[in-house]
Amino acid sequence: MVNLSKRYDGHPALAGVDLKVRPGEFFTLLGPSGCGKTTLLRLIAGLERPDGGDVLIDGREVTTQAAHARKVNTVFQSYALFPHLNVADNVAFGLRMQGMDKPARQRKVAEMLAFMHIEALAGRRPEQLSGGQQQRVALARALVNEPQILLLDEPLSALDAKLRAELQLELKRTQRRLGMTFVLVTHDQAEALTLSDRIAVMRDGLVEQVGGVTELYERPRTAYVAEFLGQANSLEVNGITGDEVDTPIGRLRLHEPPAAGLHQVMVRPERLSLGATADEACNRFEARVVERIYLGAGTRYALDVGGAALVAMVTHQSHDTHLPAEGETVQVQVHPRDIVPLAER
């Protein structure tokens, strides 16, 4: 995708997007409603044409090529199954449109139903299927045509939390078995982290940052990316001296001297340690526990540091884990490596 732009009623949906998806990767377009991610997916699919820029697939420019001529298939949020056809006929539909003869078509459909573990559903109609079963049928219908790229437009968003988590893992395993390029649109950061090899975080029609899941979570470039991908403690920088910055919670030492003009730093809640440690390299300060919320695998703390608010997350690694009470004063520590400088956009 090269310098793609698109406007609707004079308003920019995409404002010059450059993006390269690698063959065989699970790539995710992540962002809130209205950021341009679905528009970008539709341009790849050929369901829309850009106002400017080019779409290339395998090095070939396909910007004006019709959707049916592209080696791309799409699984929509609604699944768009044909209600009058049973599962087998739904999966076979694209092959029939290609003119494949009936014996070959039946063989391919049987192979795909077995691959997706839904062969027992072959004779059912869509209204006889659960949401998870419909999702598998929609995926089988898209994959049976052997597309070069599979596009996924929030295909799990209508499912309940437990089923959604199960199908996320199934979707990732399917992509790995096939070695096919998958491009997913979602607003769910947990889903993006679970499924993706790389993520493009989008904002206002532009790509804010592209990277692997660890890179984006651990080293976001901007406050927007930091806060969209999980919880983040963002602190204003009021001054810089060498490798130290002045913040609302006091002076903090960074891993290396920051660039001039730094305005903000970020610390993930799980990087804040409550209680004393032997690591002399850590920054230390005192905080008062304002709120403690037990979450099973961990406890979330709202902290007050001289009027500044922080959030810490403590995992329950042993039965001896001390959980400070509300109102208690605790020592908080954070390593310089875990303080991330943030650029302004």
Image: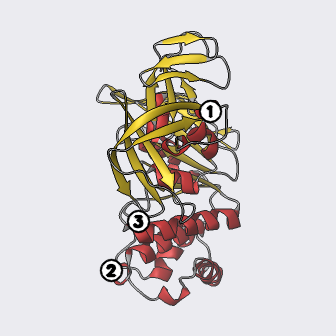
Visible residue check, residue 48: no
Q: Position of residue 226 (x, y in %)?
A: 49, 35
Q: Position of residue 147 (x, y in %)?
A: 62, 59
- Horizontal relation, residue 175 to residue 233: left or right: right
Residue bearing mark 3: 79
Q: Indicate whether 74 appears above or below 173.
A: above
Secondary structure at badge 3 equals loop
Of residue 47 and residue 99, the one placed in the foreground of this image is 47
- Horizontal relation, residue 129 to residue 276: left or right: left
State the CA–CA distance, disc 3 to disc 2: 12 Å
Secondary structure at badge 2 equals helix
Residue bearing mark 1: 282
The extreme left residue here reads 9
State the CA–CA distance, disc 1 to disc 3: 51 Å
Q: Position of residue 243 (x, y in %)?
A: 64, 17
Residue 20 image-quadrant placement:
top right
Q: Indicate whether 140 appears above or below 216.
A: below
> Of discs 1 and 2, which sits in the foreground?
1
Q: Which mark is residue 127?
A: 2
Q: Could you tell me the amino acid type at mark 2?
A: Glu
- Residues tagged 1 and 3 counted as in contact (Cβ below 8 A): no
Which residue is at 62% across, 30% downward? 336
Q: Residues within 10 Å of mark 1 (few under 14, many from 20)?
A: some
Q: Residues within 10 Å of mark 2 (few under 14, many from 20)?
A: few
> Of discs 1 and 3, which sits in the foreground?
1
Which residue is at 48% across, 74% downward? 137
Residue 105 image-quadrant placement:
bottom right
Q: Position of residue 223 (x, y in %)?
A: 46, 29
Q: Could you tell me the amino acid type at mark 3?
A: Tyr
